[in-house]
């Protein structure tokens, strides 16, 4: 196994999601080398003597890092792989800010799947996207990957009031190896819960009661805003950032191909 030299840039870790990532990274460090910097300025002083294979920048709020700081880091490490892991308050940065290259950004909900992809690319088992890749290239790379057809295949039922999202996401699920079936026959139940309301909570409960799916996924643009009791009351349920999932559908594969364990009627 290769030894990965990783540099983590994180000014503070007050949020729950930040602490969870730092804790897991610490546990996964061996046999990798994990260094820490509290700012980009400190990170630049570290890389002068020891250039990392991968830099992970934790961004908890918009404009936490200036365009000048980002450009300095990019110019000093033009060949180094980079992940900018952003929290829920930064989900819109990819649309209204261009401080970081789009291909480097990933929501905290998809961080470890992205980390696994980067490690695979650094080990020479796959090709990594360039920093300059756009949204269409990111999605195309995900859908054209030769390993995209998983075994075993999975069945899915997708419920969404947004017809455009329904068509787009369903086509990605089919490319992932999925097969669309009726609600009562599905292994994976996916529910688009935007916009959130009390009525939506009742809708979720109704769908789950009629399905025998072993896994239920709630799709939303604001995963951290969903009441915890909704997730806990829905059984084996995961909340997915649907914007991140639509941009990088391959990261869903590992979750969807788990062997079905149907609920008893």
Image (cartoon, grey):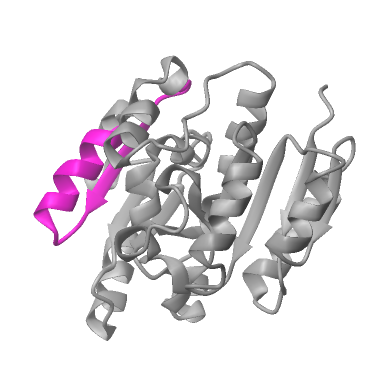
Residue 76 at least partly seen: yes
Q: Is residue 250 left or right of residue 1?
A: left
Q: What is the count of numbered marks? A: 0
Q: Which residues are magenta?
A: 150-173
Placement of 232 over or under 23, stated as above or below: below
Q: Is residue 108 left or right of residue 134?
A: right
Residue 161 percent coordinates (x, y) = 14, 62
Query: Which quarter shows the N terminus?
Result: top right
Residue at 61% in and 24% down: 121
143 in relation to 70, above or below? above
* 173 or 23: nearer the viewer: 23
Front residue (pair 36, 199): 36
Is residue 153 inside the magenta stretch? yes
Q: Determine if residue 180 is in view.
A: no
> Is 27 or 237 nearer to us in this picture?
27
Q: Residue furthest bottom?
A: 198
Quarter of the image for residue 178 reads top left
Q: Residue at x 35, y 44 (%)?
A: 247
Whether residue 150 sits left or right of residue 6 in the image: it is left
Identity of the residue drawn at 68% across and 46% down: 55
Q: Residue at x 47, y 23 (%)?
A: 152
Residue 151: horizontal and vertical position, in percent?
48, 20
From the viewer's perspective, is 6 left or right of 211? right
Q: To which quarter of the image does residue 225 belong?
A: bottom left
Foreground of the two, 152 or 95: 95
Residue 82: x and y in percent read 60, 43
Whether the magenta-drawn stretch holds residue 157 is answered as: yes
Q: Position of residue 128 (x, y in %)?
A: 52, 27
């Amino acid at each position: 196994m290769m030894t990965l030299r990783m540099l983590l840039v994180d000014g503070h870790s007050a949020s729950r999601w930040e602490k969870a990532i730092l804790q897991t990274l610490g546990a996964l460090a061996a046999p990798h080398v994990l260094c820490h910097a509290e700012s980009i300025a400190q990170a630049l002083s570290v890389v002068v003597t020891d250039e990392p294979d991968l830099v992970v920048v934790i961004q908890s709020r918009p404009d936490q890092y200036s365009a000048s700081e980002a450009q300095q880091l990019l110019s000093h490490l033009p060949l180094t792989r980079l992940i900018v892991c952003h929290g829920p308050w930064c989900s819109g940065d990819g649309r209204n800010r261009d401080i970081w290259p789009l291909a480097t950004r990933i929501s905290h909900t998809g961080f470890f799947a992205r980390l696994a992809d980067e490690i695979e690319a650094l080990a020479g088992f796959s090709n990594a996207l360039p920093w300059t890749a756009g949204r269409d290239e990111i999605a195309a790379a995900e859908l054209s990957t030769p390993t995209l057809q998983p075994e075993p295949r999975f069945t899915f039922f997708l419920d969404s009031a947004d017809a455009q999202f329904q068509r787009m996401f369903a086509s990605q699920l089919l490319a992932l190896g999925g097969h669309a079936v009726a609600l009562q026959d599905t292994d994976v139940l996916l529910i688009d819960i935007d916009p959130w309301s009390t009525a939506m909570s009742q809708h979720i409960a109704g769908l789950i009661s009629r399905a025998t799916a072993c896994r239920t996924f709630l799709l939303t643009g604001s995963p951290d805003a969903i009441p915890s009791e909704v997730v806990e009351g829905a059984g084996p349920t995961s909340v997915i950032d649907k914007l991140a999932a639509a941009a990088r559908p391959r990261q869903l594969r590992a979750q969807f191909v788990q062997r079905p364990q149907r609920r008893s009627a």
